[in-house]
Image (tube, grey):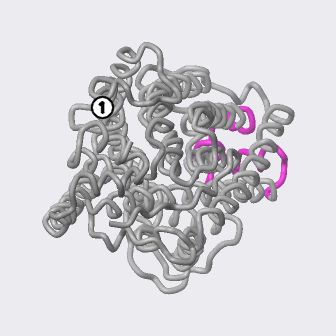
């Protein structure tokens, strides 16, 4: 058995850029106006305050677990240490599904953004999905972007981190301009209604899990961090707070920048609102440049995270070992990266009509992931009280219980009993992924039956930790 390790190349700014950039994707530019209209400006901001508080309970759980078990895989290594083999498989499948599901809709989002700035000629009609006509020329733009993101991740973690940092700075720069324009050139009379009703508030709150997912890529990168363990908790909580502030500022600025009909019915609402506020269409295109940066950071972060989760399972012989191979030159989980890249590229052929499928289905994967991590926190406190914890949460029973309740609440939202149940195609995506994953996991369990528990611990946690 080889004790293979990824290189520790991520600095503090790399980790922050990875987490923040992953959380801030495309959703804000399409939905900020609709959020303000559905719940009211203050209602939508309030929904994000509540959502951020709920997610912070999950974040606090991650804050204790990540420096205590700082190895690639996040929920995989947490669940294995606390609950064993199959819970680790479930956690890994849920996490990879959540990440790849979000990465899958970045391709269509990218092509949509490019089409706004530079209209793409409609050449080579392919098919229609969800009333959206897909052309080869449109799909090709998304496929090329997917290939570039995959290549960046294939070449090395540091290259991916540099790419993430540059794109995140571009996103922030455009966001600052937009907020400045909304405050100085907007009109308070546009910011109506302030509140609508509880139904509108709930509708916005439903979307919070999908908008905040991304801070949890920090545990996936733990094996590649060159950061003091005690610093990790603050990075986790800071990234959640920064994302919450971003979404609230975007809602406020969109509401101030343009009347309701523009920010709700525009081609790309936030871009149209920015163009209206500054009085020229070019500002809408500048806004889209920031949105493209957001798409790229989210895409890059989720492809990175998804590949690390799959690598963690495969390296421990809990999935076919071919997916756990590390590239001899680039020191990346090359085959896992390629698998995630291929799945992301395939989705580029589905058009923007399929975006809602991936968003909703991946959100369900997110809440399963949160549930497994919360359970890991509780079981580790009970079964491994002497585990060294560089950061130890106070009131652990309360925090653990709240994290479980948050995960249950978010899960309820998507069930048939909840207010926004998944539809047939979304359930098919969820169930299909887990069926395929369990088939591969059962195959791996049979093929690598001679791998001992000690050997698997070495593969997950390294020789030094296993021996201690």
Which residue sits furthest front? 467
Which residue sits furthest bottom? 124
Q: Residue at x 61, y 31 (%)?
A: 234
Task: Looking at the picture, tell me which residue is in the foreground, 21 or 80.
Answer: 80
Quadrant for the N terminus in the image: bottom left
Q: Which residue is mark 1?
A: 375
Task: Looking at the picture, tell me which residue is in the foreground, 110 or 91.
Answer: 91
Residue 222 screen position, x and y as percent: 52, 48
Q: Residue at x 37, y 60 (%)?
A: 310
Question: Is residue 292 found left or right of 431 in the rendered image?
Answer: right
Residue 20 occupies quadrant: top right
Residue 174 screen position, x and y as percent: 77, 49
**Image: magenta residue range:** 254-281
Task: Looking at the picture, tell me which residue is in the foreground, 156 or 186.
Answer: 156
Residue 403 occupies quadrant: top left
Residue 334 in the image: above or below residue 392: below
Residue 274 falls within the magenta-colored stretch:
yes
Label 1 CA crowd tier, 10 Å (few <14, some 14–19, many 20+): many
Residue 347 occupies quadrant: bottom left
């Amino acid at each position: 058995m080889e004790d293979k390790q990824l290189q520790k190349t991520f600095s503090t700014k790399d980790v922050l850029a990875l987490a923040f950039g992953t959380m801030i994707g495309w959703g804000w530019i399409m939905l900020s106006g609709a959020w303000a209209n559905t719940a009211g400006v203050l209602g939508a901001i309030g929904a994000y305050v509540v959502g951020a508080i709920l997610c912070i309970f999950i974040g606090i759980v991650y804050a204790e677990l990540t420096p205590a078990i700082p190895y690639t895989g996040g929920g995989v290594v947490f669940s294995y240490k606390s609950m064993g083999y199959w819970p680790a498989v479930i956690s890994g499948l849920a996490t990879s599904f959540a990440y790849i599901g979000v990465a899958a809709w970045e391709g269509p989002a990218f092509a949509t953004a490019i089409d706004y700035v530079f209209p793409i000629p409609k050449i080579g009609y392919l098919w229609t999905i969800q009333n959206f006509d897909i052309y080869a020329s449109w799909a090709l733009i998304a496929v090329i972007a997917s290939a570039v993101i995959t290549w960046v991740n294939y070449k090395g973690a540091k290259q991916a981190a540099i790419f993430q940092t540059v794109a995140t700075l571009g996103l922030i720069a455009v966001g600052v301009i937009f907020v400045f324009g909304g405050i100085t050139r907007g009109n308070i009379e546009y910011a109506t209604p302030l509140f609508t009703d509880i139904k509108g508030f709930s509708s916005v709150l439903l979307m919070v899990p999908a908008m905040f997912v991304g801070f949890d890529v920090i545990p996936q990168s733990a094996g590649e961090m060159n950061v003091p363990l005690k610093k990790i908790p603050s990075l986790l909580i800071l990234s959640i707070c920064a994302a919450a502030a971003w979404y609230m500022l975007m809602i406020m600025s969109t509401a101030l920048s343009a009347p309701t009909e523009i920010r709700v019915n525009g081609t790309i609402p936030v871009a149209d609102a920015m163009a209206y506020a500054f009085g020229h269409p070019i500002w809408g295109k500048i806004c889209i440049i920031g949105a493209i940066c957001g798409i790229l950071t989210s895409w890059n972060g989720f492809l990175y995270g998804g590949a690390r989760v799959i690598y963690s399972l495969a390296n421990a012989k809990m999935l076919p070992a071919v997916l756990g191979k590390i590239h001899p030159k680039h020191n990346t989980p090359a085959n896992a990266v390629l698998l995630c890249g291929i799945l992301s590229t395939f989705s580029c052929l589905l058009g923007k009509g399929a975006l809602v499928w991936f968003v909703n289905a991946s959100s369900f994967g997110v809440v399963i992931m949160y549930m497994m991590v919360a359970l890991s926190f509780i079981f580790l406190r009970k079964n491994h009280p002497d585990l060294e914890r560089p950061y130890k949460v106070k009131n652990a029973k309360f925090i653990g219980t709240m994290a479980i309740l948050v995960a249950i609440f978010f899960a309820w939202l998507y069930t048939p009993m909840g207010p926004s149940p998944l539809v047939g195609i979304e359930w098919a995506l969820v169930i299909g992924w887990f069926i395929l994953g369990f088939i591969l996991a059962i195959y791996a369990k049979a093929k690598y039956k001679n791998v001992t528990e000690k050997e698997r611990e070495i593969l997950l946690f390294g020789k030094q930790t296993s021996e201690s």
